[in-house]
Amino acid sequence: MDNQTAPKPYKAHFKATLVLGLPIIGSLLAQTAIGTTDTIMVGWYGVDELAAVVLATSIYFVFFIVGSGFAMAVMPMVASYEGAGDVKQVRRVVRMGLWISVIYSAALMPFLWFFEDLMIAIGQKPEIAALAQDYMRIAQWGMFPAMLIMVLKSYLSALERPAWVLWGTILGAIANGLANYALIFGNWGAPEMGVAGAAIASVVTASITFLVLAFYAQYQRVLREYAVFTRIWRSDWPAFIEVFRLGWPIGATMLAEVGLFSMSAIMMGWLGTRELATHGIVLQIASMSFMIYLGLANVGTIRTGHALGRRDKLGIWRASVTVAALQLVIAVVLIAVMVLLPKQLIGLFLDRSNPQSPDIIAYGTGLLMVAAAFQIVDGMQVIALSVLRGIKDTKIPMLFAMLSYWGVGIPTSYILGFKLGFGGYGVWGGLVIGLALAAVTMLSRFFWQMRRLSF
């Protein structure tokens, strides 16, 4: 370790983690609240519509998260270059992260347009697939601002300026709720549009959030020296390749995990509309807890990235231990909430007057117990993965993720759910096993890397 400053005690690491982490966690929860609002309001509208939106958003999220890999690559790169005091290189990687995001979003458009045919081909009910396509043909336009938002979030968070990320996301969440209320149900003189209204609301939300973050990044006084939008049209192929090289394994890793959950949605669709709708509700609840872990994980990426730029091995270790300890405490609290209040949590997403609601609540209570079972390992695997990302280790973790989720998790879900007859509970049991294996392998990789660091 050749940094010149004295090592920080753990107390200082905990304080710094909370100061940076709370706004990041808040912004991620606000972002998840957008999807949760969609699920709640569409659930009030109808069960078939809820199943269709769950199906469409599950697949949309797969493509979104793969593209986010390039945006997530910007975070450790900016953190490391900022730690080394290289403003020019920060500007270069952010610009090319924006370029890659636009190119990626455009490449998806033809595929998402013909969503109904794909869903029918993989065994979904025709009426649900048709509704899902109605949603997707509108929602796909939100991919452009959504991808750009992720790049700007990574940039601002890595510079330890997450407050505007939080406020921009909260503003978007409020706009989403109002637009959903108007367009899904036809309130305030708006047309009643059902799932199409939810899709329009999502596009409007992403656009508003992007404009807020872009305005801040361009005009905030302390950020002017980075000038990330100045001459944005100019190519920078070395930086483009650098972002792409670090980003594609991150995207593939995220695809492996999100693909596990999206494949579980497809399997639940094979079981029936009730199962798919219930899966969407419980997954939204689990997503809220995951966003807390992901917020801490982002802090781990940023703080280990800064320490890497300073060549501070002890700083990398203590930053990693701090976020892992906080994750364990939070996981225990969330497990207690899920175990003690399952019916109340699931009931938030349903119109209690709907005759199908009691059946969905009863079925969802069991699924929520399975979700509670994987809280610790789910949080630990994303923490380990993110601190590895902070020290720019992405390719081997990608292989571990593919093995854990696709090699073990998905086959186990299918065997437990269909071959052994456990249905939806078996499908979710496979999720537990895949996440647990990921946690073990990622943690092992982190310990191995720490032994190898020589500075």
Image: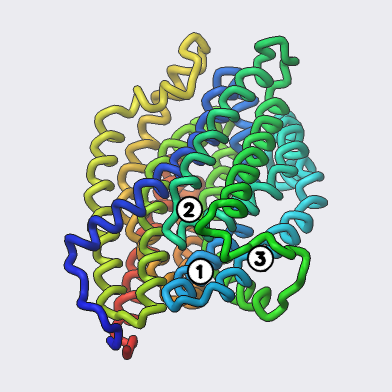
Please state which of residues 314 and 57 is positioned toward the viewer in this rendering: 314
Q: Is residue 176 left or right of residue 145?
A: left
Residue type marked 1: Val
Quadrant in the picture for the C terminus: bottom left
Q: Which of the two discs, 1 and 3, labels the residue nearer the N terminus? A: 1
Residue neighbourhood size for the residue with mark 3, other residues' Cα within 10 Å, grouped as few (<14), some (14–19), many (≥20): many
Q: Secondary structure at mark 2?
A: helix
Please state which of residues 209 and 389 is positioned toward the viewer in this rendering: 209
Q: CA distance from mark 1 to mark 3?
A: 11 Å
- Image location of residue 17, percent across then percent down: 30, 57
Quadrant in the picture for the N terminus: bottom left
Residues at marks 2 and 1 touching, judged by CB atoms closer than 8 Å: no
Q: Which residue is mark 1?
A: 78
- Image location of residue 364, percent across then percent down: 41, 30
- Image location of residue 423, percent across then percent down: 47, 40
Q: Which residue is mark 2?
A: 415
Q: CA distance from mark 3 to mark 2?
A: 45 Å
Q: Is residue 419 left or right of residue 244?
A: left
Residue type marked 2: Ile
Q: Give residue 440's quadrant in the image.
A: bottom left
Q: Which residue is mark 3?
A: 95
Residue 442 bears which disc, if any? none
Whether residue 106 can be seen here? yes
